Amino acid sequence: MTDFERALVNSFNNFFEQEGIEGIAHRKKQHRFSSQLCDVLVDSPHETFYLAIENKSIKTSSTNKLYFTQHFSDTEGGHQVERITDFVQRSGRKGYLAVELKRGRGRPRKAYMVPWEEVSHRYRNGEKGIHVDEFVGFPEITRISGEYNFADNLVEMFT
């Protein structure tokens, strides 16, 4: 589990505990030779928090775009965007892409939540990816003292 995935799982679970909301965020154990559908799953009887989240971290010093060819896998089972789209549709979850921008030494990381429909739409339309500058148009995951925190904007983010 990456630091970003762990931070999202912890942030969701802290939010649920603090707000007294039934829900749990978790990451399925990944086995060496099997792929997982999404990085983080959030289960809750509340429809708002029934989520599938794919996480990506990119260094803005080495790329200006999150590319569908470079940052997503393509296996015998199909392209990762296609596989996640199928999972989201069949499971009834709301899908999101959580993107962490590593902006270099001395600059804090930023993260954004992109609705999966947007990712799927761009992929189906033959776009190469999503430019780094475009992420600011999506909800930002607040970062307090180096930790991601959904408490301030979680409800607005997922409704």
Image (spheres, rainbow, N blue to C red):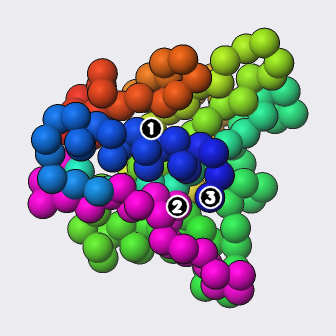
Q: Which mark is residue 1?
A: 3
> Looking at the rendering, in which quadrant would you find the C terminus?
top left
- For the residues labelled 1 and 2, the Cα–Cα distance comes to 14 Å
Front-most of residues 33 and 98 = 33
Of the residues under marks 1 and 2, which one precedes in the sequence? 2
At 15% from the left and 53% from the top, the residue drawn is 22
At 29% from the left and 56% from the top, the residue drawn is 24
Of the residues under marks 3 and 2, which one precedes in the sequence? 3
Q: Mark 1: few, some, or many residues within 10 Å (few <14, many ≥20)? A: many
| Magenta stretch, residue numbers | 25-48
Classify 128 as above or below 137: below
Q: To which quarter of the image does residue 26 belong?
A: bottom left
Q: Mark 2: few, some, or many residues within 10 Å (few <14, many ≥20)? A: many
* Position of residue 44 measured from the top left corner of the image (x, y, whole percent): 19, 58
Classify 88 as above or below 78: above
Residue farthest along the right direction in this orientation: 62
Which residue does the numbered mark 2 point to in the structure image?
A: 39
Which residue does the numbered mark 1 point to in the structure image?
A: 113
- Where disc 2 sits, the SS reads loop
Camera-near label (1 vs 2) is 2
- For the residues labelled 1 and 3, the Cα–Cα distance comes to 19 Å
